[in-house]
Amino acid sequence: MKPTAVSTAAHAGGSAGQPQRGSFRERMRRARRFLATNPLILIGLIMTVFMLAVAIVGPEVAPYDPTRINNLNRLKAPNAEHWLGTDEFGRDVLSRLLYGARVSALIGFTTLVLTTVFGTVVGLVSGYFRPLDAILMRVMDGLMTFPSLILAIALIAVLGINAFNVVIALTIVYTPQTARVVRSSVLSVKATDFIEATRALGNRHVRIMFRHVLPNCVSPLIVQSTFIMGYAILAEAALSFIGAGVPPPAPSWGNMLADSRVYMYQAPWMTYFPGIGISIFVLGLILLGDGVRDYLDPRN
Amino acid sequence: MVFILRRLIQLIPTLAVIAVVAFFLIRVAGGDPTALLLPQDASQEDIQRMRRSMGLHQPLFLQFFYWMRDLLSGNLGISYYTRDTVVSTIIDRAYPTLWLAVSAQMVAIVIAVPAGIISAVRQNSWLDRLFTIFALGGVAIPNFWFAMMLVMVVSISLGWLPSQGFTDPLQDPWQGFRRLVLPSVALGYLQAGLITRMTRSAMLDVLRLDYVRTARAKGLRETAIVGRHALSNAMNPILTVIGISMASLFTGAVVTELVFNFPGLGQLIVEAVGRRDFPLIQGVLVILAVITLLINFFIDISYGLFDPRIRYD
């Protein structure tokens, strides 16, 4: 019988940083006990789910068209009609905030998916085939040396300013981090006996990599992905803020903050809310990532 | 000495990657620069002449070879917009950024290292929770938004400090200091978040070790245990994160400078993007990457100072 990756890793003492596994009920009990002693992960989970819900449902329930200009309604403070006030073109800040949430979440999520795919492939190949490791990891090291936002700015300057290119730039910037995480997991999984056994059974490399090595690298990958989404949301906001992200008039939290700069004194509400939105979203993701990492840490 | 040499040799492939990325990013993906430099109605002859004068008619590998040769001799080309050399343009604007980076990093270290140590020593206390929230804020709150909030409260509402521009602190120390406070605090908070988290976890790892328990059993005072025994062993990861955070310092400086109208490298790169001034973007990219690489190199070789177990030879 061919050993499955998961059960054998558990026999090997969870050497890939996996928690000891037990029955489903036991695992649920462990998770509940962990949540009770670590309320921050619960708070992170609630914040993240809330912001994702806002991103999905928000635009459907937004009271106004986020791009509709109404010059008679310029810079109105929060009131019964416009709960979060209006901006310099009389556009409803709440509606723009809700649409902006979707833009941020979409860019963050797409970056997460692409980074995970490319980072996993590079990390797997690099950790599995040692001769390729030197080349691939030097490239990743080189990319990691560039300050992330400045590399993203340079890429966008070359590719052109739009949301799609923001995703491409952020994927290039963050892939090396994911590749590094996957590679280090692959190296430790590869050293276990069961990989040796699957190789002895005559499995092909691709099958060993994806069927047996990859499932044992999932935990650190999940943690990394949570952080990447947070960083991507922050980076998108920063890029849009400096005018190299989502171009106006489409609302994004970053370009809303850029618009608000001139009106900080007259209309501070334009500044408050996008910043609070970004902070809650990113904080939720970081708390969640921290919590999942602590949960999966074999020392706990 | 051998270790330092070996580390220096290891820098070469990374430097090569930096050069290749920077070159191909701009040359291949950036399109034909003559389209940006010449007026739209330029004749085909003018375009060809310009291409020849810039060496663009040569095969790509030759262009790369010449570019590398120039790079190694410190020549990063001419800015499309200022018509000045990229190096001198960058040097002019690096001065304010250097002040900002150094003072922000000082703000961060002064706050974050003690906060991280106290957090670890008093693990799970209310002080630990307070510092944890503080550190998480630094990582999660966009630093340009935090900067805007500081401007709103400290400059606009209270009128305590100016919020725009840069004055050389060597020329006018008082004005220079006043103008540096808010940008440094804004950028320093981002850094402090990272450093506090790392200091705390490094200290926690060390405080769990047997030798700390032995020191305590010997009856040493807690300050001596933490200050002399634990901290020196936790210093390497702390130094590493301070080094790594230099990269985020440059990243943060771009947006912070924009909020405070600070005439530094950050604003230069934003201007360069607006004008599609590719040699300048390329120059900033290469210089910042090399600085980050060198900082990490020096941190690597300074490990031995804090951990006598590390022998380089």
Image (cartoon, coloured by chain):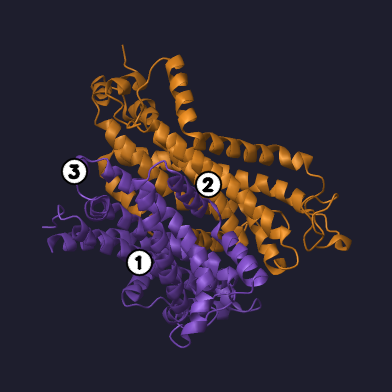
Q: Within 10 Å of the Cα at label 2, are there few (<14), some (14-19), or many (20+) other Cα atoms?
A: many
Q: Chain of mark 3?
A: B
> Is residue B123 at all visible to an observer of this figure?
yes
Q: Quadrant of residue A4?
A: top left
> In this figure, which residue is indicated by the disc labeled 2?
A230
Q: Position of residue B48 (x, y in %)?
A: 52, 77
> Is residue A252 at all visible to an observer of this figure?
no
Closer to the camera: disc 1 or disc 3? 3
Q: Is residue B168 above or below residue A73?
A: below
The disc label shown at residue B125, or none = none
Q: Which color was chain B given?
A: purple
Q: Secondary structure at mark 2?
A: helix
Q: Quadrant of residue B291?
A: bottom left
> In this figure, which residue is indicated by the disc labeled 3?
B211
| Quarter of the image that includes the N terminus of chain B | bottom left
The Cα–Cα distance between marks 1 and 3, rounded to whole angstroms, is: 39 Å
Residue placed most toward the observer, B163 or B281:
B163
Q: Position of residue B276 (x, y in %)?
A: 56, 70
The disc label shown at residue B290, or none = 1
Q: Is residue A49 above or below residue A230?
A: above
**Mark 1 touches mark 2? (CB < 8 Å):** no
